[in-house]
Image (cartoon, rainbow, N blue to C red):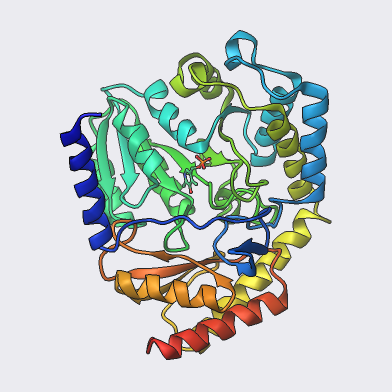
Amino acid sequence: MNTEFTIHLKQTLSTLEQQGLYKKERYIEGPQSNKIRVNNTEVLNFCANNYLGLSSHPSLIQAAHEGLDQFGYGLSSVRFICGTQTIHKKLESSIAKFLGMDDAILFSSCFDANGGVFEALLGEEDAIISDELNHASIIDGIRLCKAKRFRYTNRNLESLEQNLKDASSARFKLIVTDGAFSMDGTLAPIDKICDLAQKYGALVMVDDSHATGFMGENGRGCHEHYNCLDRVDIITSTLGKALGGSAGGFVASSQTVVDMLRQKARPYLFSNTLTPPVVNASIKALELVSDSNIGGKLRAQLKANTQKFRTEMTKAGFHIYEGIHPVVPVILGEAELSQKFATEMLNEGIYVVGFFFPVVPKGKARIRVQLSASHTNEDIEKALQAFIKIGKKLSVI
Ligand SMILES: *Cc1c(COP(=O)(O)O)cnc(C)c1O
């Protein structure tokens, strides 16, 4: 390896460390759950995207085994050559039905879905109008597309409307937003965004990765929560969060849009198909969330857990952004404090992580708590007590 190149990288890495921005990974010694083992100790996990507690659900593990036994380990192919099994089509139609769309198309991840969707559908005559806090994969996907780019202030309708006016000469306009913003636990006002889209003749795309499976009466997502089931044109989302937490993403839309993506989306055409155990378990995950006795109960539990935690934390004097989403940002301020807080919490048996610049704005460092249906009342009590103890110790409350 070229020595100067290595020195250059080492310097960059040590700058990250000095600025307190270096990300270290902790090793989990077992399956994902509300209780996990870290450093040979059992701790409560409050930072997984395991919203419905399905990540290690026995039915999903069984379905994954069945997928493996009946359809094999791998396909050694992309979808259009010899990588499409009956279960891939079954999963796509389950997703479409669940979301209220014509069809869906699978990708290896939602990152890939967002990487492929824009370039395949829009050209330089078109405009994409994107929320400034959209996920990195949306930003990258837009970069790969020749459409003109417009960016509006987070969840701000006046800013969105101004951008729609500025983009008026475009052939087609696409508004794109995260359904739920993962760092703030806030929701995009989908209903009002759809109103503006209608007024200006724009299309609407929602990345619902932090909502699919649990937002809305039947868990369909933010479009259901805002009564916009037939108003959102394109939904992208992940199988890697509430729907079992393994891997995979998708785009759900009209038949024509999905047909076009199968022809043109590059991550779909040039990357391997999803593996049978994941596909079969994802079909099961959708069955569970669609079942009001199972999914409905998990959603009710998640909602109760979220409400309890939000109410008690506010009462204790912490600064949290208001809302209803199971992402609860506990705002602390400086990066160092957020890291110190997280370390102290782990000593109390609560696994949470500090988030700081550049992931969130400077001075807005935070602990991002994520509730799950798998948390018991006792788990939440323990977390609250630890927050209050450490909050007092570090003079936050
Ligand atoms: C997590 C997330 C993704 C990435 O999903 P993967 O399937 O893990 O690639 C994309 N968009 C949003 C909004 C996300 O939260």
**Which sits in the foreground, 197 or 115?**
115
Q: Residue extending furthest left?
A: 4
Q: Is residue 98 left or right of 358 when viewed as pictured?
A: right
**What quarter of the picture does the C terminus occupy?**
bottom left
Percent across and percent down for residue 65 are 80, 35
Asked whether the viewer can see residue 90, the reply is yes
**Quadrant housing residue 39:** bottom right
Q: Is residue 224 left or right of 123 when viewed as pictured?
A: right
Residue at x 55%, y 18% (from the top left corner): 259
Q: Is residue 241 left or right of 217 when viewed as pictured?
A: left
Establish if 245 lies above or below 173: below
Q: Residue extending furthest top?
A: 81
Asked whether the viewer can see residue 321, the reply is no
Residue at x 33%, y 55% (from the top left corner): 157
**Quadrant housing residue 107:** top right
Residue at x 69%, y 40% (from the top left corner): 98
Percent across and percent down for residue 27 are 55, 55
Establish if 122 lies above or below 360: above
Percent across and percent down for residue 59 are 82, 46
**Which sits in the foreground, 163 or 5?**
5
Percent across and percent down for residue 231 are 53, 42
**What quarter of the picture does the N terminus occupy?**
top left
Residue at x 26%, y 23% (from the top left corner): 125
Q: How many marks?
A: 0
**Which sits in the foreground, 172 or 328?**
328
